[in-house]
Amino acid sequence: MNDVRYENDIRALLMAFFPGEKIVLDDVRFQPDKMMDVTYKDGRAAFCFTDGTDRMEDETDLLDADYRMGKNQIKTAVYDMLCRWTGHTLPWGTLTGIRPTKIPMAFYDEGRGVKEADAYLEKMYKVSESKRRLCTQVAANEKKILDTIPFGEDISLYIGIPFCPTICLYCSFSSFPLKVWERKVPTYLGALFKEMDAVAKMIGGRKITTVYMGGGTPTSLSVSQMDRLLSHIEETFDLSSVREFTVEAGRPDSLDERKLKAIRDHGIRRVSINPQTMNQKTLDIIGRRHTALQVEKAFYMAREAGFSNINMDLIMGLPGEDTEDVARTLDGVRRLSPDSMTVHSLAVKRASRLNQNLEAYPPAPPRTVDRMIEMSWEAAQDMGMIPYYLYRQKNISGNLENVGYARPGYEGIYNILIMEEKQTIVALGAGGSSKIVYPEENRIERIENVKNVKDYMERIDEMIQRKRKLLG
């Protein structure tokens, strides 16, 4: 059990059982002479020591000092111990990975069905019935879409605009307050255009499946800057094969009719308007600096501008919120009736202001967040949506998940591609992380752009050279 390779998995389980607690690594080793009692179950031995500490080891380990339990075995051992100790189980059992859908997807690729995948998730990872149902459904819906995409040499593009009206309490992305950086935006766009021009030459005639403009908040740009950016994308890349072009319009306080029209005039039909919550007290706490009414106005403006595919992002477990607050948010979303809805479990990231102020802004308890997630699934079903993509994050509340729901035909293709890692995605801009996929070698190479805007602008030639090594 003392092999360092298992530390991260055990730490993830401990964090899930004891949210908010500090997890430290102790260097205590297995000492048989201090053993008080031994009980055997399913080939494993539970050792109780005189210092009151429980240890779980495999019987074989007593005979062979070099033997190491398999990853799943050791996680199951620790999980069983923690379940007995706390009296609780975890919705995702021993699964700590960020892409659980890869498990049933492998079954489907081999021609096996949902029942086999479900049984495997239960037996190997002790996943609860509701999460097994969610996981197998998402994988099945993903596969239907992935089967329509010719991978091969095709790629997708991510374009990062790292500016926001204000920085949210929970944010750890590459986001910079627009008021501070407003004068530097033209310089940033100049560097971004230089990277675009270089990448267009590197990818040659490769077809582009999706384009996703994220951030930050891309609609922090002025109308003229947005028009200039979209025009440069059209002039630089061949977009004739693009199936989906998304612009995140996440902050309602960054939108007006002129800006939405400028985006729509470039043929873009999909935007994401992200309230996170429809409760004003929470919006104030997390630093959104807009009202719930502005969310509704922005949504209706987007519909009137001709956007036929609108997504809305929500976060479950925000500080101070309970299930009644979430019910009000979901009622508001139902009234607007978006085409898709992405539901995130709050993740307390190390670099966020929330992580530095947890005592002042305690997130909702994990079991409350799980109920919030269930409520969002019920609301999605009411709106005729199905779960189509799923992922998990480090430090996510309750060891839970983020789920994308959509009406059939309105799924975010880029979201599936970024999760399933079956297609190369080239990311441009500060903080961009490219994934270069080599399917024949079952290998992925990553190319990271620096996160800091100033560094990106000053080191743009270096960013281009990093890509040239793998793309050129």
Image (cartoon, rainbow, N blue to C red):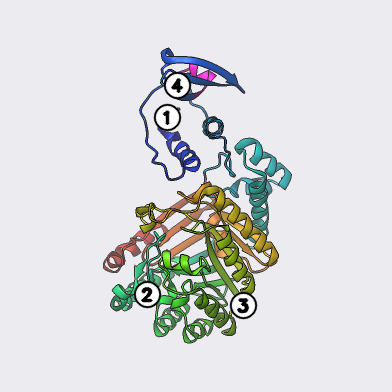
| Disc 3: which residue | 308
Seen at 48% across and 61% down, the residue is 425
Q: Which mark is residue 194?
A: none
Seen at 47% across and 87% down, the residue is 258
Mark 2 Cα shell of 10 Å, populated few (<14), some (14-19), many (≥20):
some
The quarter of the picture where residue 72 lies is top right
Kind of residue at disc 4: Asp
Seen at 44% across and 77% down, the residue is 253
The quarter of the picture where residue 405 lies is bottom right
- Residue 452: percent from the left, percent from the top? 31, 63
Q: Marks 4 and 2, Cα distance to the nearest angstrom?
A: 55 Å
Kind of residue at disc 2: Phe
Kind of residue at disc 3: Ser
Please state which of residues 394 and 332 is positioned toward the viewer in this rendering.
Answer: 332
Mark 1 or mark 2: name the one nearer the start of the chain. 1
- Kindly report which numbered mark, 2 or 3, lies closer to the viewer in this rendering: 3
Please state which of residues 376 and 259 is positioned toward the viewer in this rendering.
Answer: 376
Looking at the image, residue 269 sits to the left or right of residue 463; the answer is: right
Mark 4 or mark 2: name the one nearer the start of the chain. 4
Q: Which mark is residue 193?
A: 2
Magenta residues, as a range? 56-65
Q: Residue 156 colored magenta? A: no
- Residue 4: percent from the left, percent from the top? 40, 33
